[in-house]
Image (cartoon, rainbow, N blue to C red):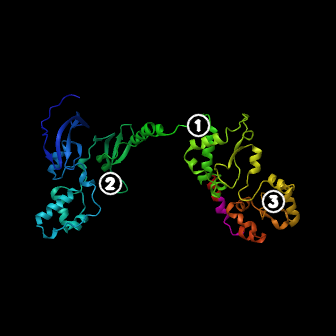
Amino acid sequence: MANHSFKTKIEVGRKFGMLLITKELTERIYKGKNNNGYDLWVRQVECLCDCGTIVNREYATLPKMERLKRISNCGCLKYHKKSKDLARIEGIESMSRKEKYDIVKDLIRKGFNNVEIYSATGVSHSKTSNIRKEIGANYYTIDKDDIKVGMRMNFLTIISLTDERDVSGNRMVKCQCDCGNVKLIRWGHFRSGGTKSCGCYMKEVARNMMKEQLIPNNIKHADTKGGPHHYLYTLWMGIKQRCYNPNNKRYSTYGARGIGMYEPWINDYVAFKEWVLTNLGERYDANTGKRGDNESFDRIDVNIGYYPGNLRWADFQTQANNKTIHSLGHRSRKMIEEETGKKMLSAKKLQEIYEEYYNVKITKGNVVHHINWDASDNRRKNLLEVTRAEHGWLHQTCNYKLKTESRSSIIKILKNIDWDGYDLQRKINRG
């Protein structure tokens, strides 16, 4: 940038309001084109505020604030951290008017509001407001002349003025970001520098934080897609979803039943992986591409969660025999056959027996339900025709207590349920 000669000399050591000029900065702020079409570069100065803060300011704004009888500051007048409870000043009643006004001025400069000043000094709100105007510490009001096309702050440049306001009534300006996006920005946020870009700046900050801080500090297990133990990582994620995510379609048979995970494993995959490999070893993989040919993670007691001592690798048949349909006490067909020594009836055969018992034809889509949850008891008083939705509802954990109810009681309970709402909730849970 070419050297320029300026008519106005910057006086180092001169004070404007609460800001003392310490030096002139060589860096200029580009303000776009002036009326003659030339590039407009604005001088900056480094200032020391009375509160001890060092800030950079455009030099042209300092004399302007002085002419308007406003106090130039680093922002501490408005944002100064003040005490929540301002105690009443001792001896304030016996002080002269001038002494009271000096105290009020000092409290205004420290950032206290009119209510707090009144409680400490007894000076009325109106008199305090007059003092604010006198020293130029009243709230800064936005003038249209202050907003100009071409003004630049951080990554934003004002390209046009609008009459649009946000929901709170604050003035908006149309800005173009350095990345090319055009966006309406609140003028106060633009002027203060609070809004730095259209949003791309924060994305870049987050990206850099991820690269420089989060990723290096995270334990790298290398078991995401393509890792040597990817199946363990997938297993760990699936368990957490089933146990702790109400939106997961299998939550009703896991998390809703109280099935959980060993707490030290919930947020520590590495600890989970080390325990599995140390105590259970590697999973057998037949490499056939069929899931049923491989071993799977099995809970020895299906009514207890994923805890050390309750886990094993099991083949498909072993795990199938160990499953529950929904929860407490409802055993698989093979388990019942092994326990009772009786051959279990197929669904079709059970339907034929029911139709013969009651001399009825079961509606297409309906099933036969064992009222006392004992699938080996096929007496007529233990059988009931229900819809698929009713059958699923009856086999929920919370309804296990109904196994002691009579057939007539179950029928009465089912009639009083809002099945439309139940079906809707099932669809929501399935996602």
- Residue that numbered label 1 is attached to: 223
Residue drawn at (14%, 64%) of the image: 100
Q: Secondary structure at mark 2?
A: loop
Q: Range of the magenta residues?
A: 415-423
Image: 354 above or below 310: below
Residue 18 in the image: state x and y as whole percent.
18, 49
**Residue type of the residue flagged with mark 1:** Asp
Give the label on residue 238, or none: none
Q: Earlier in the sequence, mark 1 or mark 3?
A: 1
The residue that mark 2 highlights is 170
The question of residue 230 being in magenta is answered with: no
> Picture coordinates of residue 322 (x, y %)?
75, 51
**Mark 1 or mark 2, earlier in chain:** 2
Which residue is at a point 68% across and 67% down the rendered structure image? Answer: 417
Q: Nearer the viewer, mark 1 or mark 3?
A: 1
Toward the viewer: 254 or 368?
A: 254
How far is mark 1 from mark 3, CA to CA?
Answer: 43 Å
Residue that badge 3 annotates: 375
